[in-house]
Image: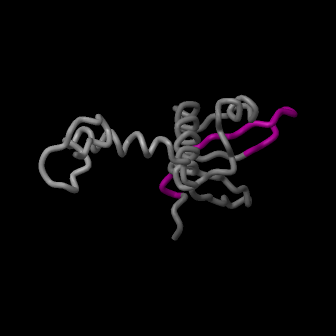
């Protein structure tokens, strides 16, 4: 006699059946996936999404600045970005999708200058 791997009820039907219904099958696989360690892809994706969310939140007008430490304390990590753009002065802006930043020192304080991707930034 076989039992459901999730709810432990008696299985009826095929001899190689492992779950009593789709709910038990889905729940079992969801629980097992939570026990596995996150892959590097998932960790990077989470950090990129966190960075984008924070940049979007603090840059509602299209151009803003925020203290480096304040943004980093909220979970921002400048090492994770999707692409970069170099302006005519040679400054390199790092982007998390459409939201960009550059680290500058203004009035002896380290700040991130926040920008949004513009049409003129596209390569020609």
Q: Which residue: 70% across, 35% down?
A: 72
| Residue ID at (57%, 48%) | 43
- The span shown in magenta is 103-120
> In this orientation, does residue 116 appear?
no
Depth check, front residue: 89 or 30: 30
Q: Is residue 56 left or right of residue 79?
A: left
Q: Does residue 109 show up magenta in the picture?
A: yes
Place of residue 74 in the rendered image (x, y in percent of width and height, measured from the top left): 65, 30
Q: Position of residue 50 (x, y in %)?
A: 56, 39
Instruction: Give the main secondary structure, helix, strand or loop, of the magenta stretch.
Output: strand
Q: Provide residue 105's location: percent of width, then percent of height.
A: 82, 40
Residue sitting at x 74%, y 35%: 68
54 in relation to 15, above or below: above
Q: Is residue 12 visible?
A: yes
Q: Nearer the viewer, residue 124 or 103?
A: 103
Instruction: Judge whether residue 91 is colored magenta.
Output: no
């Amino acid at each position: 006699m076989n039992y459901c791997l999730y709810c432990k009820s008696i299985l009826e039907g095929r001899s190689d059946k492992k779950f009593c219904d789709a709910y038990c099958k889905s729940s079992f696989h969801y629980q097992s996936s939570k026990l596995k360690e996150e892959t590097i892809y998932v960790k990077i994706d989470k950090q990129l999404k966190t960075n984008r969310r924070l940049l979007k939140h603090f840059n509602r007008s299209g151009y803003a600045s925020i203290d480096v430490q304040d943004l980093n304390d909220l979970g921002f990590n400048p090492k994770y970005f999707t692409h970069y753009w170099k302006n005519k002065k040679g400054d390199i802006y790092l982007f998390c999708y459409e939201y960009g930043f550059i680290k500058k020192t203004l009035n002896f304080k380290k700040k991130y200058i926040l920008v949004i991707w513009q049409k003129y930034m596209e390569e020609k």
